[in-house]
Image: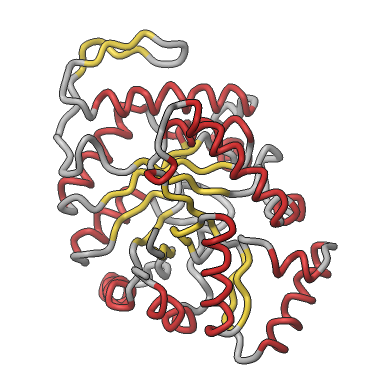
Amino acid sequence: MQFTFAVTPPAMTDSRTWIDALRRLEDAGFHSVVFADHFTEGWDAEPMVALAAAAMATTTLRLQTGVLSNDYRHPVLTHRLAATADRISDGRLILGMGAGWLRSDYEQADIPFDAPGVRISRLEEALSIVKQLFEDQPVVHQGIYYRINGLVGVPAPVQRPHPPIMLGGGSPRVLRFAGREADIVSIVASLRAGALGSHAVEDLMAERVSEKLDWIREGIVSAGRDPATVVLSINHWLVRITDTEDDAAAYLGKVAASHGVDPGRLADSPAVLVGTVPRLVDVLHERRERFGFSHLQLDAGFPPRDIEPLLPLVGKLAGG
């Protein structure tokens, strides 16, 4: 599959500057802009509103939720928001959904933070409802968590049968589910702890990512799907373009020491992208061959500190 690049755009200071930044990303060859769905820890935008604004400012950028936390919206509302965003963007939405994981969101908004298995079960049921609502037929659903009584999902989306569904996760159950149901599967660290930390760094080392890919494949096989139809994505938590490989090694050494991991293992992590542009071009080709990743998010949900150094890398690989 061809390389596609996603990124979180700069934070909005004023609308004119923000629109100019979006158009710069579009012109540079980025495939999509992404907005995370959190209330705390520094995230400060409502994703569907931000994506609607981005749709009006651009013409080719895809608009990706990365990812909507299922517990924050009823699936009927998720469907309505997604269908409307797909309409106003002329079919550019990528609907990312997840079970919800950030404990501080739940605590500060006073939302019950159920056990991971419960949240995943609720996501499974919610996605089933969202997909049914895209079918233009009355939906009757009597589930464990949701009841739908003859509702017809409107408006009709531009993309049929529905916008591409992206599911992200790091645990066996979520990734098998994603293999069964998603058009794009995004690998992240297991977030059972409800917060980020060094455990997440370790969980994205190459050997762990290979295991996660096995869980996705198990889901694909169990559903009788063609693996070639499922796009594999990874969210890079550490990205830096350096002038020299010595600079890259020094930076990786500092980050590795702060997390208590081996620098070589850190450099080999598919979620880490540190080096010169020529070297990273080779690295990404190697990882696509080794792991299958073609959809690449160049941040961990926050805008990169400096997008400009990323543009030559995107320009060399986007669509190739």
Q: Which residue is at 36% across, 61% downward?
A: 33
The answer to which of 296 and 73 lies nearer the viewer is 296
The image quarter in which residue 260 lies:
bottom right
Q: Horizontal placement of 193 versus 82: left or right? A: right
Seen as rendered, the residue at the extreme bottom is 243
The answer to which of 17 and 96 lies nearer the viewer is 96
- Residue 140: image location, x then y, percent: 27, 11
Q: Is residue 34 above or below residue 68?
A: below
The image quarter in which residue 125 lies:
top left
- Residue 186: image location, x then y, percent: 50, 48
- Residue 148: image location, x then y, percent: 30, 14
Confirm whether residue 102 shows in the render: no
Q: Horizontal placement of 190 versus 7: left or right? A: right
Q: Which residue is at 45% across, 31% downward?
A: 180
- Residue 78: image location, x then y, percent: 33, 34
Confirm whether residue 289 shows in the render: yes
